Image (cartoon, rainbow, N blue to C red):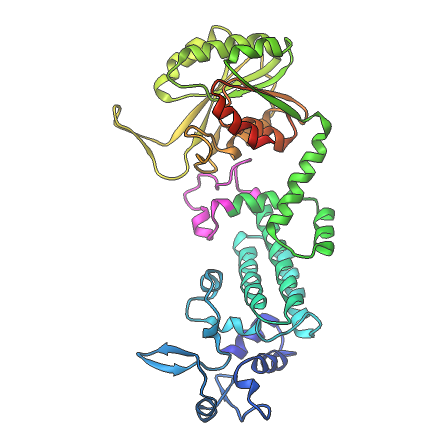
């Protein structure tokens, strides 16, 4: 019961009675005039006798067994159920919430014991399950501490444990996840769903784990409110600072040929673009431009569709050296190609080089970060583009996109600290792209 649960959490009998006493004092029954009513033990927890409940005549009830019963012990039915609590402890076991309304602050030895034990358990955690269990417990406790008055210190401590757990989960996931990939590798025995982790959480927690320990501890010590979003802001700010003043660029309106007069020869580190798939002439124009403007060994990457893949390869190979074909596996349902009766699950990205390529190590199968079409019907997923740019260039490198659409490539360059020059034929779409990098 409740007492056993508190003892298991704290790992000691010391302070258990204090937790229960404070929780009782915060409950409707503990505020009966004249002090505590007479109590008795039920499964090791203090509860009000039925006569005291009837005398108090509380306004809140909970439904049980087809009849209305007085809300007992800590009146937990006055607090909304939260999915984290239900997931971690079961929908029917909401007595975990009694710890939060108890008003136990961090000066209480029993709560300090719990927080210290949680930190020690995180340091020993060697699996994602272990770290996630600590994270879910801390988040459940934080939620209910937030709803209780005079529980600010306790809420902050729980938020700190949650952030530390998320960083630890991110470190563990990074050891089993493909680089730059928010999904676990294709092992039939491992998957995010089995761990109870979404793709978004996996991506965010892995990113949070990249923040240096010194910066994280400074954030915990000085920030008024601790949150995952706050940690991620520090990560992106750090990337921008490292990029320095060499980042920035322009988006031109007009055909791709305008880039010829804007770019010096042998000046571009990477071409990355998404031309109209059916217009093979665009791929020819791209290859001709890259053959002159790329640095020796530089790469030119272009999205394309499987239907046009043979023509694209033949056209670009007339001007550049074929390097590789990357595959981006779609997130969500398959995409039917009705004329071919094919359920399409991936998209090719062809890579050509000027001479012999000089890239770093990179995986050729990416799991897409999700479908993003908020700014354009043919918009590409930002995380996919960021991965390719980060792996194939260095901070300050020049990236060119002759068919930039809504500006995903410039947006990724801005985040990663790369210079960019892009071009878009449609003036309305160009305005959308410029807003994204403004």
The residue segment tinted magenta is 174-200
The residue positioned 37% from the left and 21% from the top of the image is 306
- Is residue 189 part of the magenta span, yes or no? yes
- Spot occupied by residue 129 in the image (x, y as percentages of width and height): 52, 55
- Spot occupied by residue 102 in the image (x, y as percentages of width and height): 59, 76
**Magenta highlight: main SS:** loop
Image position of 311 (left or right of 102): left
Q: Is residue 216 above or below residue 357?
A: below
The residue positioned 62% from the left and 64% from the top of the image is 155
Q: Answer yes or no: is residue 407 visible.
A: no
Q: Nearer the viewer, residue 189 or 212?
A: 212
- Is residue 357 part of the magenta span, yes or no? no
Q: Is residue 11 above or below residue 197?
A: below
Residue 295 falls in image quadrant: top right
The residue positioned 72% from the left and 52% from the top of the image is 217
The residue positioned 60% from the left and 15% from the top of the image is 298
Q: Answer yes or no: is residue 267 visible.
A: yes
Q: Which quadrant is home to the C terminus?
A: top right
Residue 77 falls in image quadrant: bottom left
């Amino acid at each position: 019961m409740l007492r056993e649960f508190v003892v298991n959490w704290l790992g000691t009998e010391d302070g258990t009675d204090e937790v229960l006493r404070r929780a009782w004092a915060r409950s409707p029954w503990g505020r009966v005039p004249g002090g505590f009513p007479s109590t008795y033990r039920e499964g090791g927890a203090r509860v009000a006798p039925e006569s005291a409940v009837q005398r108090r005549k509380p306004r809140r009830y909970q439904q049980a067994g087809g009849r209305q019963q007085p809300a007992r012990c800590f009146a937990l039915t006055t607090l909304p159920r939260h999915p984290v609590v239900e997931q971690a402890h079961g929908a029917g076991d909401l007595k975990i919430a009694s710890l939060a309304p108890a008003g136990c602050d961090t000066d209480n030895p029993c709560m300090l014991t719990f927080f210290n034990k949680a930190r020690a358990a995180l340091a020993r955690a060697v699996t994602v399950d272990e770290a996630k269990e600590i994270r879910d417990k801390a988040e459940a406790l934080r939620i209910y501490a937030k709803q209780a008055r005079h529980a600010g210190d306790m809420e902050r401590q729980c938020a700190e444990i949650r952030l530390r757990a998320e960083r630890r989960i991110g470190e563990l996931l990074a050891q089993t996840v493909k680089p730059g990939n928010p999904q676990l590798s294709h092992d039939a025995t491992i998957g995010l769903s089995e761990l109870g982790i979404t793709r978004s959480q996996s991506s965010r927690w892995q990113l949070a784990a990249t923040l240096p320990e010194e910066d994280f501890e400074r954030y915990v010590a000085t920030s008024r409110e601790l949150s995952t979003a706050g940690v991620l802001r520090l990560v992106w700010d750090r990337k921008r600072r490292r990029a320095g003043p060499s980042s920035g660029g322009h988006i031109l309106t007009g055909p791709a040929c305008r880039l010829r007069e804007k770019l010096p020869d042998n000046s571009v580190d990477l071409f990355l673009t998404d031309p109209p798939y059916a217009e093979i002439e665009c791929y020819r124009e791209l290859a001709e431009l890259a053959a002159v403007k790329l640095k020796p060994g530089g790469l030119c990457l272009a999205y394309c569709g499987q239907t046009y893949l043979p023509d694209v390869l033949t056209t670009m190979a007339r001007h550049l050296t074929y390097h590789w074909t990357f595959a981006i596996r779609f997130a969500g349902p398959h995409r039917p190609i009705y004329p071919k009766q094919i359920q399409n699950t991936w998209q090719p990205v062809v890579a050509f080089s000027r001479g012999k390529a000089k890239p770093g190590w990179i995986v050729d199968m990416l799991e897409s970060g999700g479908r993003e079409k908020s700014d354009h019907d043919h918009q590409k997923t930002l995380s996919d583009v960021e991965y390719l740019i980060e792996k194939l260039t260095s901070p300050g490198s020049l990236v060119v996109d002759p068919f930039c659409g809504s500006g995903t490539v410039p947006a990724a360059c801005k985040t990663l600290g790369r210079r960019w020059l892009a071009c878009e034929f449609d003036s309305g779409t160009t305005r959308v792209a410029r807003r994204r990098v403004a």
